[in-house]
Image: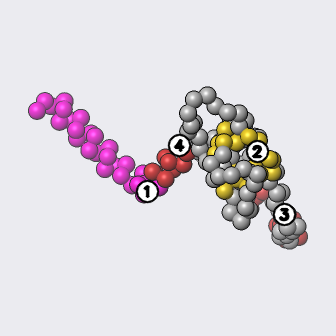
Amino acid sequence: MNRFVKSAMAIGIALFLFNAGVANANSVGDFFRKLGNSIAHPQKRARERNTVHKTDSDESPAKSASVTPTPANTAIESPTPPTIRVASAAPPGKGGKRDFPYGIPVPGRKGLVTSPFAPDAGYIDVRNFPPGTEVKDPYTDKIFLTP
């Protein structure tokens, strides 16, 4: 082998050995889970952690002794209920049967679904439609099937 190739390989191996303890590897399953979530939910971003570290020099001992810790939010806030809109019948299509996704049933709420196109928008009332009916999503104006 060429002297240059041997020396480059020696340098590469040395760098690998010196940096072996630096890498923080997660499991392969975590990698594929994060990859799948980034594909399935591209609009969601990972929450950034804002950490502020106070040192002893940031506040005086007299001030820190007078401060008593209190809960930040003592009142229990009830979550706002999602809005409910009524679905309308889809216009008849030209040709044969069209292929549309099904609405997602809301657990414990018979006749209510969430949109397959905007699952976080709110609930859709489809109680007046039999299963398999094409209805128009009131949030996105796209068509889906009732479950």
Residue 112 image-quadrant placement: bottom right
Is residue 35 at least partly visible in the picture? yes
Is residue 104 at least partly visible in the picture? no
* Residue at numbered disc 3: 78
Q: Check disc 2: other Cα within 10 Å, few if <14, some if 14-19, many if 20+.
A: many
Q: Position of residue 130 (x, y in %)?
A: 68, 52
Residue 117 image-quadrant placement: top right
What SS does tag 4 mark? helix
Frontmost of labels 2 and 3 is: 2
In this view of the protein, which residue sits in the foreground, 107 or 67?
107
On residue 96, the disc is none
* Residue at numbered disc 2: 87
Q: How far apart are the alpha carbons under marks 3 and 1? A: 36 Å
Q: How far apart are the alpha carbons under marks 2 and 4? A: 29 Å
Q: How far apart are the alpha carbons under marks 2 and 3? A: 27 Å
Pick whichever of labels 1 and 2 is earlier in the sequence: 1
Pick whichever of labels 3 and 4 is earlier in the sequence: 4
Disc 1 residue type (three-letter)? Gly
For the magenta stretch, what is the residue range?
A: 1-30
Placement of the N terminus among the 4 image quadrants: top left
